[in-house]
Amino acid sequence: MTPAELVLLPGLNNTAAVFDDVKAALPDTLRAHCPDLPALDTVEDLADHVLRDAPPRFWLGGFSFGGYVAMAVLDRAPERIQGIALICSGPAADTPVQAAKRREAIAGARQGSYLETAAASTAPFHPDSLARPDLLARRRAIVQAYGAQRYIAHCLACIARPDRTGLLDGRHPTLLVTTTHDRVVAPENLARLAADVPGSRLEIVADAGHLVPLEQPRALAGVLARWIAHGDAS
């Protein structure tokens, strides 16, 4: 049987390496593509970058900022998308408060504080993860590889993105993944979204914060594999 194609897009402060353990845990029935997102400052340009190298038809998953790009991919090429998964993410635009905070972060990054600020943040982690030096070291390495230039560009892309909630209208299988301890994208927001999206599926990964691809990769791989298997069988 030909494997299903799955494209996974990383979040803010993350390279494609955030999905390394997820990719390794996926079954042979899935072929994962995990592209890096370059320093482009609109989600539309990033979507075009993803679509250039993506398979003709594919399942799409976006983690955090990658979810914003995934929504732009869906907007650009709905006929190529077999289903969309938003992982600790959502389809809405930034609020004015969120946009203001991003502008402050951009100013700090331009002044040279990016690496230490991003690497030191504990907000994306489950409390238990803070006692895992291996995980913290991997996070720092990813942040360092990602860099301030990409961070600034992607923050600008976040601020400029439109609300694409209306695209989640039930015409594409939709998976919404949250965790028990996400302090970045509130689980209750995804639960409300799931109630409004026809035919959507909500999955909650236990013992993880926002960084679920690093913290619980096998669990996330299982959620994605079951969702795609169900969709392929429908």
Image (cartoon, rainbow, N blue to C red):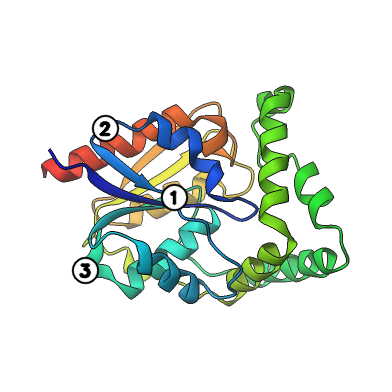
Q: Earlier in the sequence, mark 3 or mark 1?
A: 1
Q: Earlier in the sequence, mark 2 or mark 1?
A: 2
Q: Which residue is mark 2?
A: 28
Disc 2 and disc 3: Cα gap in Å?
25 Å
Looking at the rendered structure, the secondary structure element under dot 3 is helix
| Rendered position, 77 above or below 62 | below
| Rendered position, 30 above or below 114 | above
| Rendered position, 1 above or below 74 | above
**Residue 123 in view of the camera:** no
Task: Tell me whether the residue at label 2 lies in contact with that at label 1, contact meaning CB atoms closer than 8 angstroms.
Answer: no
**Quadrant where the N terminus is found in the figure:** top left
Q: Earlier in the sequence, mark 2 or mark 3?
A: 2
Q: Which residue is mark 1?
A: 34
Q: How many discs appear? A: 3
Residue drawn at (67%, 35%) of the image: 138
| Amino acid residing under circle 1 | Cys
Disc 3 and disc 1: Cα gap in Å?
20 Å
Residue drawn at (41%, 62%) of the image: 70
Looking at the rendered structure, the secondary structure element under dot 2 is loop
**Quadrant where the C terminus is found in the figure:** top left
Q: Which picture quadrant has residue 58?
A: bottom left
Q: Which residue is mark 3?
A: 79
Q: Position of residue 65 (x, y in %)?
A: 54, 58
Residue drawn at (24%, 53%) of the image: 173
Looking at the rendered structure, the secondary structure element under dot 1 is loop
Q: Position of residue 174 (x, y in %)?
A: 30, 52
| Amino acid residing under circle 2 | Asp
Q: Position of residue 142 (x, y in %)?
A: 66, 45
Q: Which picture quadrant has residue 201?
A: top left
| Amino acid residing under circle 3 | Glu
Task: Tell me whether the residue at label 2 lies in contact with that at label 3, contact meaning CB atoms closer than 8 angstroms.
Answer: no
